[in-house]
Image (tube, rainbow, N blue to C red):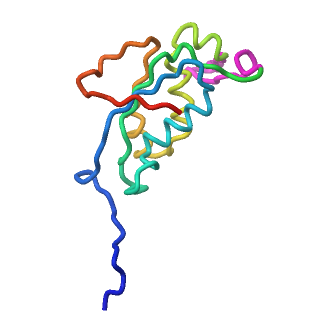
Amino acid sequence: MDTLSYKTISANKNTVNKEWVVVDAKGEVLGRLASQIAKIIRGKHKPDFTPHVDCGDNVIVINADKIKLTGDKMTDKVYVRHTGYPGGQRFQTPRELLSKHPERVIEKAVKGMLPKSRLGRQLFTNLFVYASAEHPHQAQQPKEIKF
């Protein structure tokens, strides 16, 4: 006898409802903004969240060059990468990265908050970051959201 009047819903690729949202990064703190973006990309804000499925929304971030970092992080924080050659370790501060590629600061922060798996790499493709206020995704009719 079935005594429950409700069933657990498990979303899949065919039943998920993906939307487009726009986030304005102007004056926002990097870590706080990145955690909210990661939550939306992952789909944790939806009632039918399923951990192993891409059920999140596509996120467009504009004004990435106007992001804020608190304290002395602009000069003291260091992004480390390696070229793959001996002695190829390279260091960059957020100030240097913002001057050349402002989008990458937000991309690095959000990517670090996503799962480190095939699903995480696939979820990262749902993020679109632009340094200016214009973006080429008007045809998707994205909704503007505030944090």
Q: Dividing the picture into quarters, in which one does residue 49 lie? A: bottom left
Q: Nearer the viewer, residue 100 or 18?
A: 18
Q: Which segment is the magenta one?
A: 72-92
Q: Is residue 82 above or below residue 126?
A: above
Q: Dividing the picture into quarters, in which one does residue 135 lie? A: top left
Q: Is residue 31 above or below residue 120?
A: above
Q: Dividing the picture into quarters, in which one does residue 120 lie? A: top left
Residue 98 percent location from the top left of the image? 58, 12
Q: Residue at x 49, y 16 (%)?
A: 63
Q: Residue at x 57, y 7 (%)?
A: 99
The extreme top residue here reads 99
Q: Is residue 97 magenta?
A: no
The extreme bottom residue here reads 1
Q: Residue at x 37, y 13 (%)?
A: 134
Residue 146 percent location from the top left of the image? 49, 31
Q: Residue at x 36, y 81 (%)?
A: 4
Q: Is residue 145 left or right of residue 6?
A: right
Q: Nearer the viewer, residue 14 or 122?
A: 14
Residue 14 percent location from the top left of the image? 22, 52
Quadrant, the N terminus: bottom left
Q: Is residue 137 left or right of residue 84?
A: left
Q: Is residue 78 left or right of residue 18?
A: right
Q: How many marks?
A: 0
Residue 45 percent location from the top left of the image? 45, 48
